[in-house]
Amino acid sequence: QVQLVESGGGVVQLGRSLRLSCAASGFTFSSYGMHWVRQAPGKGLDWVAVIWSDGGEKYYADSVKGRFAISRDNSKNTLFLQMNSLRAEDTAVYYCARRLIGTNCFDYWGQGTLVTVSS
Amino acid sequence: QTVVTQEPSFSVSPGGTVTLTCGLSSGSVSTSYYPSWYQQTPGRPPRTLIYTTNTRASGVPDRFSGSILGNKAALTITGAQADDESDYYCVLYMGSGSWVFGGGTKLTVL
């Protein structure tokens, strides 16, 4: 069965960096685009970034452009999110989600990893 | 900056029917936006309900249906049950590799 397991979250100081990972299993990872979506405490879902199946195209929300970088290692079935210059407003649970082939929708979601940016 | 709009809250009686909507601050939602719907309960990840306007995800009961109603995407729950009490989010594909979520609707079943 499809599994997405995020890791790498934790408490980080303002302005520092953190790298999240999402380990995928149960499907052919290299065939699927992948997203990061976040949710601040008590708030709604917020799309962060997407990467195409071959890593050839990457897109970001304006709020993270220039600070975050999405990448993937298809040989290790792993998705990454490098987060730099972290701000208090980046505090959130970060989910990885699979892009449903042939659509612009999400199908499977991970359990999420909490990132807390503290001063 | 286009905003995706959803009703902040809605209530439905057990067994009743409710329609949640997903609109745009400017313009109309069409199938070209690939509207999709997600259900979330506190402390849990989202669960995909509906994708590409009206296709139910695997395992989703047929009392959940999606459509375009007027200028909005819509999620209709027919025969609401207690465990449908959740937050519901829509997301639209805005083109050029950009997605925007609505603010979510908190559904109460009482």
Image: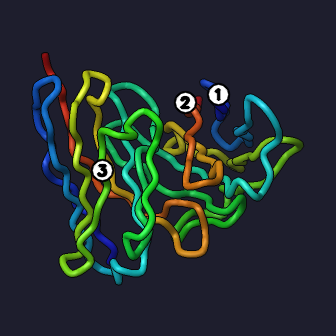
Label 2: how many residues lie within 10 Å, few (<14), some (14-19) or many (20+)?
A: many
Is A108 placed left or right of B75 in the picture? left
Q: Mark 2 or 1 closer to N-term?
A: 1
Relative to A92, say whether A103 is above or below: below
Q: Tell me the amino acid under the disc marked 1.
A: Phe
Between the C-alphas of marks 2 and 1, the distance is 6 Å
Q: Which residue is mark 2?
A: B106
* Coordinates of residue A108 in the picture (x, y in percent): 41, 64
CB of mark 2 within 8 Å of CB of mark 1? yes
Q: Is residue B4 above or below residue A58?
A: above
**Residue B91 visible in this rendered orientation of the protein:** yes
Mark 3 and 2 residues: CB-CB less than 8 Å, in contact? no
Residue under label 1: B10
**Chain name for mark 3:** A
Neighbor class of circle 3 (other Cα within 10 Å; few <14, some 14-19, many 20+) is some
Instruction: Categorize mark 1 by other alpha carbons within 10 Å: few (<14), some (14-19), many (20+).
Output: some
Amino acid carrying label 2: it is Lys
